Image (cartoon, grey):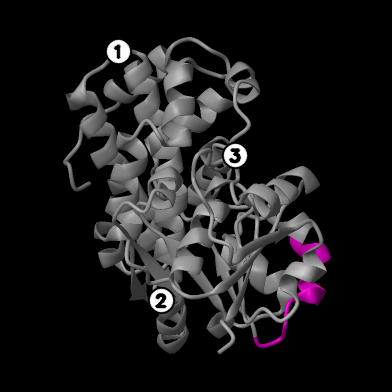
């Protein structure tokens, strides 16, 4: 019996790790890679040594630099490129995606300029309806997923039947997906936690302890909840895997790109210096500006996000940011 075919567009650490999950769940997986040499290495040695060194990939995973080859016959299309590059890539790929394929976003970002969530960009460029667009979000550090350590996540789609179909396609012995219909909440939780993780990383880099970090995490969750509520999300989502779960993982783990980026900022490196020191994309560095603008549009107070955005613009320093946040006017916790 032929295995169902999945196209994964993006051969970075998360795209590759999720490809392994899909393969373990019984899918025939084809990965698109931006660079031919990465694709050749996956096909030759069954390892993506650049992003997930030491992780053996199943023979059922193949890679190609040609999107037409990867997308041919795929009934499930998974997008795992940096969020700010999605539009440019989809402009080239959209006509290759089957009209009945479900498109799944692994991306956690808000587009600069348009303030659109990734599912909205997908809908605009592919013409797919809400019943064909799903989001996977949760505490999913790619290196742990690739090592098949136990993890859970959320598959969100406006159509619960489609969410359930995608759930079945990625449920493996180590990866447990739950369904949700709150696409907005799941996307906002996954996007905003990147910015909060930058702030937690800065607190770590400045040498602060667990009290400071717990404060940033908790108040960051409050900010995320206010924005989600203003945009019509389900409040329960923020206490779930795509909200609190993702926030805790990203803020607490040295494997988190955004936390690591923030930690280097806290130690005195500039934004450009940190960016030059890594090939991995820390999504919060770009999305913080979009989220701050989105919050302003909806009249939502997000002081941590605003301060991080100012720091990325190099209008303040980590130490000044902490002082500014601490000395803000006092108020009720639930104000």
Label 2 and label 3: CA atoms lie apart by 28 Å
Instruction: Name the quadrant containing residue 171.
Output: bottom left
Up the image or down, 33 lies above or below 25; here it is above
Instruction: Name the quadrant containing residue 170.
Output: bottom left
Q: Mostly what secondary structure, the magenta segment? A: helix
Which of marks 1 and 3 precedes in the sequence? 3
Q: In the shown orientation, is residue 290 left or right of residue 44?
A: left
Query: Nearer the viewer's eye, disc 3 or disc 1?
Result: 3
Identify which residue is drawn at 37% across, 57% down.
Answer: 138
Residues shaded magenta: 90-100
Quarter of the N terminus within the rendering: bottom right
Q: Is residue 299 visible?
A: no
Residue position for label 3: 49
User: Which percent across, then down, holds residue 82?
Assistant: 63, 48
Pick whichever, 303 or 77, lies toward us.
77
User: Which percent across, then down, holds residue 56?
Assistant: 51, 50
Residue position for label 2: 167
Residue position for label 1: 207
User: Which percent across, then down, holds residue 62?
Assistant: 66, 62
Which of marks 1 and 2 precedes in the sequence? 2
Label 2 and label 1: CA atoms lie apart by 41 Å
Q: In the shown orientation, is residue 152 left or right of residue 74?
A: left
Q: Secondary structure at mark 3?
A: loop
């Amino acid at each position: 019996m032929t295995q169902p075919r999945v196209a994964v567009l993006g051969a970075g650490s998360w795209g590759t790790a999720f490809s392994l999950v899909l393969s373990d769940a019984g899918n025939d997986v084809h990965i698109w890679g931006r660079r031919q040499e990465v694709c050749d290495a996956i096909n030759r040695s069954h390892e993506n040594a650049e992003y997930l060194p030491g992780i053996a990939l199943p023979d059922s995973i193949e890679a190609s630099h040609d999107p037409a080859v990867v997308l041919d016959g795929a009934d499930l299309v998974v997008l795992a490129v940096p969020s700010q590059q999605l539009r440019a890539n989809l402009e080239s790929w959209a006509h290759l995606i089957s009209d009945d394929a479900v498109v799944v976003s692994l991306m956690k970002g808000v587009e600069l300029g348009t303030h659109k969530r990734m599912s909205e960009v997908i809908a605009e460029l592919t013409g797919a309806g809400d019943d064909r667009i799903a989001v996977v979000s949760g505490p999913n550090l790619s290196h742990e997923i690739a090592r098949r350590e136990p993890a859970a996540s959320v598959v969100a789609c406006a159509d619960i039947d489609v969410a359930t179909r995608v759930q079945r396609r990625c449920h493996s012995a180590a990866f447990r997906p739950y369904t949700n219909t709150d696409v907005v909440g799941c996307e906002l939780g996954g996007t905003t936690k990147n910015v909060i993780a930058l702030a937690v990383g800065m607190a770590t880099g400045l040498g602060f302890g667990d009290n400071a970090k717990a404060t940033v995490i908790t108040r960051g969750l409050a900010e995320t909840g206010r924005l989600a509520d203003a945009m019509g999300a389900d409040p329960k989502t923020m206490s779930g895997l795509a909200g609190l779960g993702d926030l805790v993982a990203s803020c607490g783990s040295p494997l988190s790109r955004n936390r690591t980026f923030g930690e280097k900022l806290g130690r005195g490196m500039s934004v450009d210096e940190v960016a030059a020191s890594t090939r991995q994309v820390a999504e919060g560095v770009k999305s913080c500006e979009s989220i701050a603008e989105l919050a302003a549009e909806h009249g939502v107070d997000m002081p941590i996000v605003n301060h991080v955005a100012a720091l990325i613009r190099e209008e303040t320093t980590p130490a000044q940011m902490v002082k500014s946040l601490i000395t803000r006017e006092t108020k009720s916790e639930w104000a």
